[in-house]
Image (cartoon, rainbow, N blue to C red):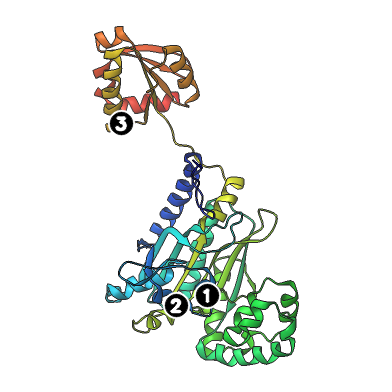
Amino acid sequence: MAQLQGIRGTRDILPDEVVRWQWVESTARRILSQAQYREIRTPIFEQTELFARGIGEATDVVGKEMYTFTDRGDRSITLRPENTAGVVRSYIEHSLSARGLQRLWYMGPMFRYERPQAGRQRQFHQLGLEAIGSADPRADAEAIAIATQILKSLGLKSLKLDLNSVGNREDRLNYRQALIDYLTPYKEELDADSQDRLTRNPLRILDSKDKRTQEIVQDAPSLLEYLGDFSRNHFEQVQTLLTDLGIEYQINPRLVRGLDYYTHTAFEIQSDDLGAQATVCGGGRYDGLVAELGGKETPAVGWAMGLERLMILVEKLAQVPQSTLDFYLISRGELAQRQSLKLAQGLREAGFAVELDLSGAALKKQMARGDKSGAIACLILGDREAEQQEVQLKWMATKEQQTLEQSDLLSNPPYLRQQLDKHS
């Protein structure tokens, strides 16, 4: 019988890696909480129409990459390829607008049918932020500042912020025709995807990775030249605020992001800590999405970080704090083994980290495992200790050993913690 394996484009996150994930998650959660962003959890699948309307049918995500199926109720269902549309759907459905500005964040798996590569999987994870209900340029700058704070707190240093404005719908309509007029004479030289986008979604051609297409768009008209007064003023205010915050940026007029719902501010934060620029965070403003999905006209801004790519950087750059093991508990003999479980659980309930050796091996082998465990102390229970309701405590750093009553070990948790800190 063939061995079962994980599906291509998915991967297991094993316990040694999970420590790193948990540290990243707790760091982000702390910073987001300080800024009064609250977590929201949405389903991993939604009606396909949500993404077709929200992201845009002409995008690669909707056209090529979604995991879509018909369920037993004959409904078209899609595993979420991103989560902004789901958060906005929830915002509308539960009338969160009645509670004023919503500062929200999420974390979880997304699904896109792409070619798997380092830092990019078909099931991948994103951390995202959404501020729904404010048109203030400070919301844009705050979102960027929080993303930057999270990345720097994780040890990333070589960060580069690309900034652009994609204007409002009217600005883009004016620019769209100018871009088509410029690109049409080069149509046969464009890559196949860009040729297909020329009339359907020409702004996406600016984001092409094809070398020849990049050369062609280098001299294309800039969207910034087509911004109206309102869009230009908003963009200038965002730049001023970032300068006030000491956040360096560069204007990238080719940055359009990959989803149709963006308006005004668009940005990407890149890191070259791996030797080549890699986008670790991308986002922007999407003032039309709430109305597009059936709500009232509502301004909003947000971003998402790809956690797989972020983990590659964290593994290289960060010193991830390791969890502390207080006690490694060793036992030998039937009565001692029974008492060891009770003692371990009592210590855990008192707030201590305890690993109970379940091997049943000889004391010498258990002690060898205790030496490698990283515990501050070993607790040793043999037949004699069990009969006397005692336990041997061995401090691993000094090898000092003492005999204690089991009841005394649990009688004063603050004092025990003080002793652990002293010997750690």
Q: What residue do we see at 38% from left, 57% from top?
A: 33
Q: Comparing marks 2 and 1, which lies closer to the viewer?
A: 1
Instruction: Name the foreground residue: 57 vs 32.
Output: 57
Q: Element under label 2?
A: helix
The earlier-in-sequence mark between 2 and 3 is 2
Q: What residue do we see at 51% from left, 49% from top?
A: 11
Instruction: Name the foreground residue: 245 vs 215.
Output: 215
- The type of residue carrying mark 3 is Arg
Could you tell me residue 63's position as x and y percent? 52, 75
Residue 372 seen anywhere in this rendered image of the structure: yes
The earlier-in-sequence mark between 3 and 1 is 1
- The type of residue carrying mark 2 is Ala
Instruction: Name the foreground residue: 23 vs 142.
Output: 23
Q: CA distance from mark 2 to mark 3?
A: 50 Å
Left or right: where 410 falls relative to 257: left
Could you tell me residue 225's position as x and y percent? 64, 88
Q: Which residue is mark 1?
A: 63
Q: CA distance from mark 2 to mark 1?
A: 9 Å
Q: What residue do we see at 67% from left, 77% from top?
A: 192
- Label 1 crowding class (10 Å Cα cut-off): few <14, some 14-19, many 20+? few
Q: Element under label 1?
A: helix
Q: Seen from this angle, which residue lies furthest front?
A: 1
Q: Which residue is mark 2?
A: 52
Q: Which residue is mark 3?
A: 348
Residue 254 seen anywhere in this rendered image of the structure: no
